[in-house]
């Protein structure tokens, strides 16, 4: 079960949408709803207007026919009735005419020879005929019935649908444009905030800041983020300073401020690797103070520390650019002379160190102390091709030098 969880989590993360896509879908839904609602409203308004227009036309046609057939109904003259409704047959939109006498019997009937272009519209707009009673001196002498068809409505419907479609398209495009503008105005500032957060998280760019975004709520959020970044940057600087101090303490001797044994081992490994790649040479000097225990026993540890500090100062003063020196033990020091060329003689450096150390050292108690050192030299790669071999050779040379110094004394 535990092994499958990361996969499902990765699928959920991969399926997440962006804010811009979410807003786009939301705005598209609102636009679609608004367009559909406005379209239905326009359609219903158009249908209502067309229905009223059609009813009014049929009503006027029926009233006109009633005036034309009144004499024919009085005299029961079908020919006169036919002539009376003749003008109505020329009016488009009338599908059928019928004149009834006072007993409800058809006197004349006319049907349009043209086909109905839209029977559905006819059934919607003209489900029943429009009837007008013909009166003479207050008495009904007959009736005129008029049926309409869709011939006059189709053009209006086409124009109305086209106009409605154009309006809907304009509304849709306008709404989409405004929605896109809204998305841009909102998503762009949020992307800027996300970019700052991304750089801070991945690249530790605590110097990044959210710029003014022009939106009050987002500016307030950006200000809070910037304040947090100010604190993080301060903490980062403090941590880097503490790290540098700890790293220096871990790699340096606190008394002489020289690199310690760990730093020397790392440096020696690098020098061997670099010299091996380029085919170069370097020298390793092993330096040990003579009779240092006697100085500690006779004058105290504070005096011994003063001697070590003076010895380290002499070693530092003799180093060239690129050389390396370290304190690897109580009174043991090493120096890496790199590169070792024809103009560099390790023995000369050793002599300068001896001469410097031979100068009287002022001790804390006011006494003077003259120190001496023994120096052993090993050269890479002649005396050793690895760190152990080089240190062994240099240590052996140092002890040989110490024996020589004792015999001379």
Image: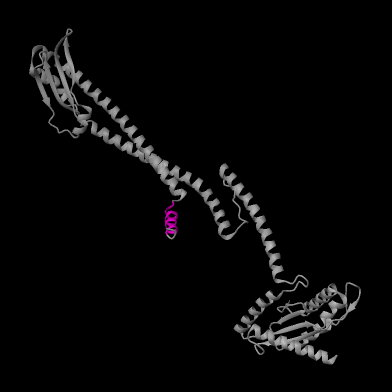
Q: Residue furthest top?
A: 137
Quadrant position of residue 81: top left
Quadrant position of residue 399: bottom right
Residue 367 screen position, x and y as percent: 91, 76
Q: Residue furthest front?
A: 297
Residue 358 screen position, x and y as percent: 85, 82
Q: Nearer the viewer, residue 357 or 306?
A: 306
**Quadrant location of the C terminus?**
bottom right
Looking at the rendered structure, the number of numbered marks drawn on it comes to 0
Q: Nearer the viewer, residue 271 or 216?
A: 271
Q: Is residue 113 left or right of residue 182?
A: left
Residue 216 screen position, x and y as percent: 57, 42
Rendered residue at 79%/85% (across/down)? 374
Rendered residue at 62%/86% (across/down)? 279
* Magenta span includes 267: no
Look at the picture and state if 320 lies above or below 37.
Answer: below
Q: Is residue 226 left or right of residue 97?
A: right
Q: Nearer the viewer, residue 123 or 362?
A: 362
Look at the picture and state if 70 lies above or below 20.
Answer: above
Look at the picture and state if 167 lies above or below 404.
Answer: above
Look at the picture and state if 106 lies above or below 207.
Answer: above
Residue 319 seen in this snapshot: no
* Magenta span includes 14: yes
**Quadrant location of the N terminus?**
bottom left
Q: Report the span colored magenta.
A: 4-16
Q: Nearer the viewer, residue 237 or 193?
A: 237
């Amino acid at each position: 079960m535990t092994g499958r969880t990361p996969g499902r989590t990765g699928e959920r993360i991969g399926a997440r949408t962006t804010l811009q896509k979410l807003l786009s879908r939301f705005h598209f839904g609102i636009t679609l709803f608004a367009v559909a609602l406005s379209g239905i409203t326009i359609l219903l308004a158009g249908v209502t207007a067309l229905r009223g227009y059609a009813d009014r036309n049929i009503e006027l046609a029926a009233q006109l026919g009633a005036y034309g057939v009144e004499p024919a109904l009085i005299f029961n003259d079908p020919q006169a009735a036919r002539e009376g409704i003749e003008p109505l047959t020329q009016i488009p939109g009338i599908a059928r005419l019928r004149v009834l006498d006072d007993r409800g019997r058809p006197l004349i009937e006319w049907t349009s020879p043209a086909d109905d272009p839209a029977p559905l519209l006819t059934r919607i707009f003209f489900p029943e005929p429009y009837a007008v009673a013909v009166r003479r001196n207050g008495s009904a002498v007959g009736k005129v019935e008029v049926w309409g068809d869709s011939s006059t409505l189709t053009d209006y419907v086409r124009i109305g649908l086209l106009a409605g479609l154009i309006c809907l398209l304009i509304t849709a495009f306008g709404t989409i444009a405004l929605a896109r503008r809204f998305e841009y105005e909102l998503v762009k500032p949020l992307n800027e905030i996300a970019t700052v957060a991304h750089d801070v998280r991945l690249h530790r760019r605590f110097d990044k800041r959210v710029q003014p975004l022009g939106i009050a709520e987002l500016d307030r959020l950006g200000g809070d983020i910037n304040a947090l970044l100010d604190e993080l940057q301060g903490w980062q600087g403090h941590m880097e300073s503490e790290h540098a101090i700890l790293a220096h303490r871990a790699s340096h001797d606190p008394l002489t401020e020289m690199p310690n044994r760990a730093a020397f081992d790392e440096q020696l490994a690098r020098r061997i690797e670099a010299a091996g790649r380029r085919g170069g040479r370097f020298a390793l000097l092993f330096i040990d103070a003579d009779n240092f225990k006697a100085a500690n026993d006779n004058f105290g540890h504070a005096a011994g520390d003063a001697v070590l500090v003076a010895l380290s100062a002499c070693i530092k003063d003799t180093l060239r650019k690129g050389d390396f020196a370290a304190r690897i033990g109580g009174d043991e020091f090493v120096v890496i002379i790199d590169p070792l060329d024809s103009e560099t003689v390790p023995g000369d450096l050793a002599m300068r160190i001896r001469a410097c150390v031979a100068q009287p050292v002022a001790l804390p108690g006011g006494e003077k102390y003259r120190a001496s050192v023994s120096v052993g030299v090993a050269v890479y790669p002649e005396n050793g091709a690895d760190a152990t071999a080089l240190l062994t050779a240099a240590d052996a040379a140092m002890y040989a030098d110490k024996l020589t110094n004792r015999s001379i004394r």
